[in-house]
Image (cartoon, rainbow, N blue to C red):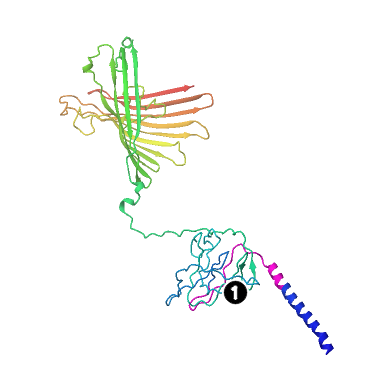
Amino acid sequence: MKRIARGRPLVALASLCFLFTDWLSAGAALAQTPPSATPPATKPAPTPSAAKAPSAVAPSAVPSAPAPAPAASSAPAASAPPAPAAAPSAAGTAPSATPPVSPAPAVSPTAPVSPTGAVSPTGPVSPTTPAVAPAPAAADASASGSLGTGVDLGAGVSAEPGPPAPVATPPVVAAPVVSEPRPAAIEDVHLDEQPSLTPFTYSGSFFSRYELRDGYADHGLTDPRLNREGDAFVYRARLGIETNPVKLGSGQSVLVKFVPQAAGTHAMGGTPETIGDAYPLGLYEAYIRLKGRGFRLDLGRFMMNYGDGLVIGQNDWHEAGRAFQGGRVRLTSANKPDYYTDLFITLIQEGIAGTKSVFKGDQYFYGMYTSLGELGAKGPILDVYLLGRTFGGLPADDSVTPSLPGQDGATTLTLGSRIAQAFTHFDYRLEAGVQVGQSQQARGVKPLDRVAFQADGAVG
C-alpha cells in the first residue's frame, strides 16, 4: 500500500509535464505564424452543385446571418444584415454559434477595398455596413472568429491585422475593334489623286522707263522702233497663270500656261489726247505642256532663250519681248541632269495675206539646240546647235495679188557652238557660227547665195 501511494505523485508530475510540453508547442506555433496584411478568405463551404468559395471576413467581427435558399439554383441570394458575433472563449478560438456562412465568389485581385478594411468580392462596400456574402441553403461549413485584436485563421491560430498591402492592378488591354467590311464608294477610291488644275501658280513682270534717242537719222538708221528719234516712256505689264500639273499615269503630266501682256510707248512729242490713248493688250505666252520620263513637249506660243540669248533669245529688254508659235520637244537624260536637246519648229510669218496657197508665203524657223553640260568636274559648258529658216515663196498672179510677179523661196542654215566657264574670280564665254544658204529677196528678184559667220566673246 505504501508503494502504491508513493507512486501517485510521480504519475501526477508526469501529467503536468505533458500538459506543459503541449502548451509550449502551441505557443511556438503562434509565434512562428507571420501576420497577414489583409485577412484571407476562409475555405469555401461545399454546395450540392458548385465548389466551395471563401467568404469575406470583416476585421472586427465575423458577421453571419441566415439567407433564404434559392430555388433549384446555385446563384447567390440577396444579402442579410449582420448578426452579433459570439463571445470569445477562454482559449480565444471558440467556435461561433451563428449559422453557416454561404460561399462567396472569389475575391478579384482588382476588387476595391472599403474604408473599414473589408474586401468586397463583387464591387464597392458601404463605408458603414460590412458586406455579407449571400448563403445558399446547402452550405455545411461555418466561419469562426474572435473578437479583440485578431482574426481567426482556422485551427485555433489568429494573426494581428496590419496595414493593407498595395493592390497590383494588371494593365487593361483593349480588345481590337473589328468592324464589318463595307463596299468602298466610288468617290472614296483614290480621292487624293483626283486630277485637278488647281492650285494655280502666278507670276508677273512690270516695268516702265524713260528713253531719250537722238542722232540715228544722221547715220541713215530709220527703224521705227530701234532708231526712233526723240524721247518716250515705254511700259510693259505681264501676269502669268500656270495650272497645277495633272497626272495622266505612267509618269506623265500635263499643264497649261497663259501670260497676257500689255505693252506700248507713251510719246512725249505729239502725244494724242488722253481719250485717244491706246494700251494694246496682247498674248505673250499661251501653251500646253506634256511632260513624261525623259521628254517635254510644248505646243502653242512660248518663249525661247538659249545660251546668252545672242542667237536665239527673248529680247527681254524690249517692251513687247519675243515669243514663237509652234511646237518644241526637249529630251533629257537621268544620268546627266544638265544635258538636254531641244527640237523645235515655229511659224514666224503667216503668208495668208499674200496668197491662198498652202505653205506659200509662210516663214518657218526650226532647229536643234543641244547642251552637253559640264565637261568633266567643274569643266566648261559646251553647247552646239543647228538652225534653219525657210521662206515658202509666193506664186505669180495669185488670186490675192493678181498681176504681180512671183517670189522664190529661200532657206538658210546656221551651224554654231558656244563654250562658257566660270572660275573663282572671273568667267569667260566664246560663241561662233557659220551660215550658208540663200537670202530672201523681193518679188521678181532671184535669191542670193549667202555664206556668213559670226564670233562673240566675253571675259569678266
Residue 415, picture quadrant: top left
Vertical placement of 197 versus 49: above or below?
A: above
Q: Residue at x 52, y 58 (%)?
A: 171
| Quadrant in which the N terminus is drawn | bottom right
Residue at the farthest bottom position: 1
* Residue 235, image x, y percentages: 32, 20
Q: Secondary structure at mark 1?
A: loop
Residue at the farthest right position: 2
Residue 330 is at least partly visible in this image = yes
| Between 134 and 206, the one nearer to me in the picture | 134
Q: Residue at x 49, y 59 (%)?
A: 173
Vertical placement of 91 versus 380: above or below?
A: below
* Residue 372, image x, y percentages: 45, 35
Which amino acid type is marked by label 1? Pro
> Does 277 sit left or right of 305 as displayed?
left
- Magenta highlight: main SS: loop
* Residue 44, image x, y percentages: 54, 73
Pointer 1 residue: 95
Vertical placement of 241 versus 426: above or below?
A: below
> Does 381 sit left or right of 253 as displayed?
right
> Does 402 sit left or right of 35 as displayed?
left
| Between 250 and 438, the one nearer to me in the picture | 250
Residue 325 is at least partly visible in this image = no
- On whether residue 83 falls in the magenta region, the answer is no
> Would you call the spot at circle 1 few (<14 residues within 10 Å), some (14-19), or many (20 or more)?
some
| Between 149 and 297, the one nearer to me in the picture | 149
Query: Which range of residues does the magenta coloring cover?
Result: 25-52
| Between 187 and 229, the one nearer to me in the picture | 187
Residue 363, picture quadrant: top left
- On whether residue 43 falls in the magenta region, the answer is yes
